[in-house]
Image: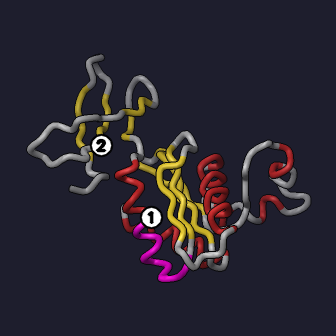
Amino acid sequence: MDPFAATVGTASTPGTTFLTDLTASSTTTPAHEEYLFVNTSTAVALLTTAGAEPLVTAAQQAAGAAVSVTVLDAGGHLLAFRRDDRAVLISGETSTRKAYTALQLNAPTAHLVDAVQPGELFHTLPIALDRPLLFIPGGVPVQRGGRPIGAIGVGGGTPEQDHSFATAAVDALA
């Protein structure tokens, strides 16, 4: 079953709607359901390890080249990472930083490159924060129901290639 398949139900509090990830077959009850309650009226399902694996696979298939792929959950925690044996070693670090940047700013890193140029809005952001931000194309937020639930980062190709691989992975699961 598709790990992104969801069902709508009602929480115990009247008027509270939620979505739940179903990672088991429809004839069984999932052993563990996780909910991310965004506010008192709606919630979206978390991105899980099971949901991260198809993103990694889709990015690698789109690449057809030696890349590293990182998927983070909404809290910035690692859900999945894969580095092709032929990928340059630094690609593991760049894929993770690209995913983290896309998640924190809820925007593809390709759209942020100009914002860190001298005189622009985020020029000092990479050095002002003690965070692993990287403003190079290849990071894309993952959303469900219009809300960020994680991010994917790809490293190892050209910046434009990395962006297209990450975008293809997110689009494949939409």
- Residue at the (42%, 33%) spot, across then down: 36
Relative to 141, residue 42 above or below: above
Label 1 secondary element: helix
Instruction: Give the residue furthest to the top.
Output: 13
- Part of the protein shown in magenta: 57-66
Q: Which quadrant holds the C terminus?
A: bottom left
CA gap between label 1 and label 2 equals 18 Å
Residue positioned 64% across, 46% down in the render: 104
Whether 145 is among the magenta residues is no
Q: Amino acid at mark 1?
A: Val
> Can you name the residue that lies furthest to the right here?
119
* Amino acid, disc 2: Asp
Where residue 9 appears, as percent x and y from the top left, is 23, 32
Looking at this view, is 83 or 125 the one in front? 83
Residue wearing tag 2: 21
Q: Residues within 10 Å of mark 2 (few under 14, many from 20)?
A: many
Number of the front mark, 1 or 2: 1
Q: Residue at 27% x, 24% y: name it.
A: 11
Which residue is at 30% across, 22% downward? 15
Q: Is residue 63 left or right of residue 131?
A: left
Mark 1 = which residue?
A: 56
Q: Give residue 34's position: percent from left, percent from top.
A: 35, 34
**SS at mark 2 in the image:** strand
The overriding secondary structure of the stretch rendered in magenta is: helix
